[in-house]
Image (cartoon, grey):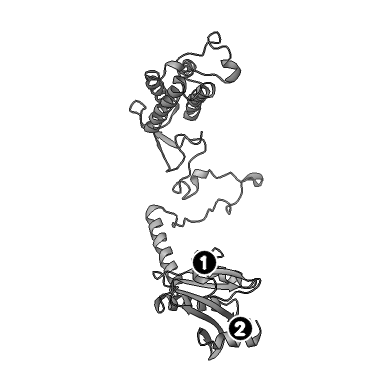
Amino acid sequence: MPKEYIVRLVLDPRHHSMIVLKNSAVIGGITYRPFWRQAMGEIAFCAVSANEQVKGYGTRLMNHLKEYVCDKEAMTHLITFADNNAVGYFQKQGFTKDVMMEREKWVGYIKEYDGGTIMECHLSAQVSYTEFPAMIRKQRAAVDAKVRELSNAHVVYPGLVHFSAPAGPGGVRKPIPAEHIPGLQEAGWEPPGLPRYRLLHPNCGDGTPSYDNLNKFMRALVNLTTNHADVWPFLEAVSAEEVPDYYDVVKDPISMEVINARVDSGEYYATLEMFAADHRLMFNNCRLYNAPDTVFFKCATRLEGFFEAKVAQGISWKQARDRGVLGDR
């Protein structure tokens, strides 16, 4: 802006100004015009001396302005036309290019410049802008204190001496087992490959998902499913003679008869996920072949809901997660 124009802005009797003093010298300032009826202030000019920039004076000045116009002048919005060099600064101060204020409140009132960008900042009387850093520090301290109550993430364990100790014959250093690293198990680490759930079914021993207990749980689920009123379409494989085109549509058929035999073998289902996947395949096959308004489609949906509910009742995740029963389908 030309110096003459800046002087006109600063000395305009309708404008108010706030300055930053350093060693009795002015190093920055903001000039704004209040619009009382709209509870809005237009920032007409904002500058910090070139040799004092990137030191936080601009942010501090803006925070004091926000605090003042909020408390003393009951303003709810600050608005400005920012040139390309100032857009980044105003964004850091909470201004946005998405102006939510009603257009009729500011169009024709504030100064508009060619190539400028209209920006707005909504003010809240519940926020202390000059104490904002201290407020954030208090919030962070409160969060840290709560985390300490729920975890041991703040505990610092002594460093490992394994790698500083002399190596064995031939310079070979014996690997240290992961479970011997202090704090690793306390942080939730478990040996890879272990199930992430416990069994809650009363006939599954102590709940440890061992293979025997898992097989008991799967047998209990099969018994419940085969006794359900909607299981009749799934008890046996679909007859190719009765439904000639079934196997042209369904490429991976399965039935409760097959699932039951696999459970009886005691060797097929190594994980609960495999067992559940076969059930879901069976239900999806039915819905793939049959129309939504058929009794078969409806039986598949009801029986699937029953099966998923029984699986969910029979297990307890070791870690809270938003993943549905046994993960994504």
Relative image position of residue 129 (x, y in whole percent): 45, 73
Asked which secondary structure carries label 1, the reply is: helix
How many numbered marks are there?
Answer: 2
Kindly tell me whether residue 199 is visible in this rendering: no
Using the rendered view, name the quadrant where residue 6 is placed: bottom right
Where the N terminus falls, by quadrant?
A: bottom right
Mark 1 surroundings: few (<14), some (14-19) or many (≥20) residues within 10 A: few
Residue at (56, 65) in percent of width and height: 97
Who is closer to the viewer here, 182 or 35? Answer: 35
Mark 2 surroundings: few (<14), some (14-19) or many (≥20) residues within 10 A: few
Identify the amino acid type marked 2: Ser
Identify the amino acid type marked 1: Arg
Comparing marks 1 and 2, which lies closer to the viewer?
Answer: 1
Kindly tell me whether residue 140 is visible in this rendering: yes
Residue at (60, 76) in percent of width and height: 54
Residue furthest top in the image: 241
Relative image position of residue 252 (x, y in whole percent): 57, 21
Relative image position of residue 174 (x, y in whole percent): 59, 44
Asked which secondary structure carries label 2, the reply is: loop
The disc at residue 49 is: 2
Q: Disc 1, disc 2: CB below 8 Å?
A: no
In this figure, which residue is indicated by the disc labeled 1?
103
Considering only vertical position in the picture, is 104 above or below 45?
above
* Mark 1 or mark 2, earlier in chain: 2
Residue at (56, 10) in percent of width and height: 240
The disc at residue 35 is: none
Considering only vertical position in the picture, is 161 above or below 116?
above
Considering only vertical position in the picture, is 254 above or below 174?
above
